[in-house]
Amino acid sequence: MSKRTIKQLIGRGYLEQAINLMIDLVEKYGNSSDVENTLYNISAQFYSNEKTRQSGRLTADHYDTTKNRLNGNLSDILDDNFKEIADSDIPQNLKDLVARGGVVVEPEPGDENDIEPGGTDAATSDTAIVLFLSANPSRTGLLKLKDEHSNIATELQDSTTLKVKSEEAVSFSEFSKAIYGHEPKIVHFSGHGDLEAPEVKEAYRVRGIGKPKGHEEVKEEKDEPGIILFDESKRNSHFVKASVLKELFSTAKEVMEIPLEAVIFNACHSEGQAKAVSEVGISVIGTSNAVADTAAIAFSKGFYFGMAEGKGIKKSFMLARVQAMAYGEPKDRFTLYVNGEKQQL
């Protein structure tokens, strides 16, 4: 019966409510570990379609085609990847929405199953998301990423304005989809960074017809700093350059209209990444050189203590910097960039 309620939401075009509810229930009722990522991807497509239509940059036919495709995708995911759902796990306001034939009834305050309009992550309209993303691929130095996440969660546990969401062992597609799906205020990456892509001895492949040109005919790109994520197979590492990160965050902020205010690259050699990403109008923290794992964790703990106390990004950065200095890092190890300019604090 309860899967039928979700099916009715989808069929009547209430995709936002259906997507958010399915994301809420996927951990309990989903049959596949890939379902959640698929739902976040659909959520990103849905919100992009809606925002583009509202801006007037999309024809009615294109909008309807995309919405109908998402309808079909959601129905297939519900049929193929969800067990039968207990009626008690369907919020009353959504049952009423179906029963009334489409009249949205706002949930009563205090209902634990309420879904906040505009997204599943908002506990209240004033609560913002800190998205903790981490990666520690094989053949890279082992980091205490779970300890860092635990420290951040502890600092924010009593905050009424911030709450932490996390995704571990991310590939670049998962890194991107998590940002689009959670719509965070702060993105915190914890893992490895480097000044240039590590050398990878791999066969050169192209997709095309005919004999590919040799490497000697292709102009090499200038080395850039970047971060190290998992590849899509989750077997190897994948280096993501600063220019790609800049484009990702530019799209998230300017096209997807995600309310990003800050990004933290808590990784070695991440000052270049911080400078590049800050140019899109986001405050970004990076590191000027290699940084010890203990100092990186201490920095995180200090930063989110400040944020939980309402100190703002710059003051929280200064509080965090002192914590890292206590573990042997110089004052200038962590750097803050705003609009492409290094802040002298």
Image (cartoon, rainbow, N blue to C red):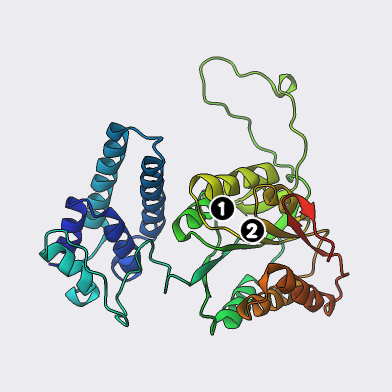
Q: Is residue 330 above or below residue 135?
A: below
Q: Position of residue 246 (x, y in %)?
A: 64, 46
Tell me, yes or no, whether the two marked residues, 1 and 2, touch with CB atoms within 8 Å. yes
- Residue at the spot 29% in from the left edge and 76% down from the top edge: 113
Residue at 73 percent across and 68 percent down: it is 314
On the image, the x and y values in percent for residue 178 come to: 49, 57
The kind of secondary structure element at disc 2 is loop
User: Mark 1: which secondary structure?
Assistant: loop
Q: Amino acid at mark 2?
A: Ser
Give the image quarter of residue 336: bottom right
Three-letter code for the amino acid on which mark 1 is drawn: Arg
Answer left or right for 59 relative to 317. left
Label 1, on which residue? 235
Which badge, 1 or 2, is on the more N-terminal residue?
A: 2
Q: Nearer the viewer, residue 39 or 140?
A: 39
In front of the other: 261 or 146: 261
In the picture of the structure, the residue carrying the numbered disc 2 is: 138
Provide residue 319's location: percent of width, then percent of height.
76, 77
